[in-house]
Image (cartoon, rainbow, N blue to C red):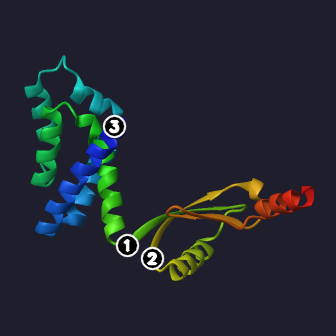
Amino acid sequence: MALSGSSARRYAEALYQIGTSEKVLDEFGSSLQRLHDALSGDVVRALRNPGIPLRARRAALDAATAAEPKAIRSLLDLLLERERIALFPQIATAYADLVERRAGIVKGRITTATQLSASDREALIRRLERSSGKKIRATFAVDETLIGGAKVQVGDRLIDSSLKAQLDELRRELAS
């Protein structure tokens, strides 16, 4: 199914190029996010249902997306016509990732042993941004097995400064 991922990226890239030339990247992003949320599994299944005439599916989709940008509506129509509407959620995600990547924003995942306060989260993100030189959009998680410290994943780089990792390393050293 790797092809669907690359197809989604190609559609997202095309939308990005249109959005850039028309200076509507944010508008496209907002529209895609709204539609991503609205086009749940049941809606996509209904739009893919061959028992419903294409004309009726297109009319329903057109009515539901009348307020969306023309390029987004055209994409949805194309996906519907080519029986590829199931790709839409992947396209919306790929577009958001592409916009962030081109803006120099990287995703980060920070896992700590305890819940951090909002000010601690902001301070940690600022330190990571200073050290990486990039803007970081972070998600936070709690894993009590870490005992203390944190695991920080920024892009493809993992920094594990948890107490659990340090104890595991000490155990390996003592065992050898």
The part of the image, by quadrant, that contains residue 7 is: top left
Q: Vertically, is 166 above or below 76? A: below
Count of numbered circles in the view: 3
Sequence-wise first label, 1 or 2: 1
Indicate the amino acid at tag 2.
Answer: Lys
Q: Vertically, is 37 above or below 147? A: above
Indicate the amino acid at tag 3.
Answer: Ser
How many C-alpha atoms fall within 10 Å of the one at disc 2: few (<14), some, or many (≥20)?
some
The part of the image, by quadrant, that contains residue 42 is: top left
On the image, numbered disc 2 is attached to which residue?
A: 134
Question: Looking at this rendering, what residue extends furthest in the bottom direction?
Answer: 130
Dot in front, 3 or 1? 1
Q: Tag 3's secondary structure?
A: loop
Relative side of 174 to 23, left or right: right
Q: Which mark is residue 40?
A: 3
Sequence-wise first label, 3 or 1: 3
Indicate the amino acid at tag 1.
Answer: Gly
> Which quadrant is home to the C terminus?
bottom right
How many C-alpha atoms fall within 10 Å of the one at disc 3: few (<14), some, or many (≥20)?
few
For the residues labelled 1 and 2, say whether their Cβ atoms are less than 8 Å apart: yes
Which residue corresponds to the image point at 23% horizontal and 22% vertical from the top-left?
49
Q: Which mark is residue 104?
A: 1
Give me the C-alpha separation between circle 1 and circle 2. 6 Å
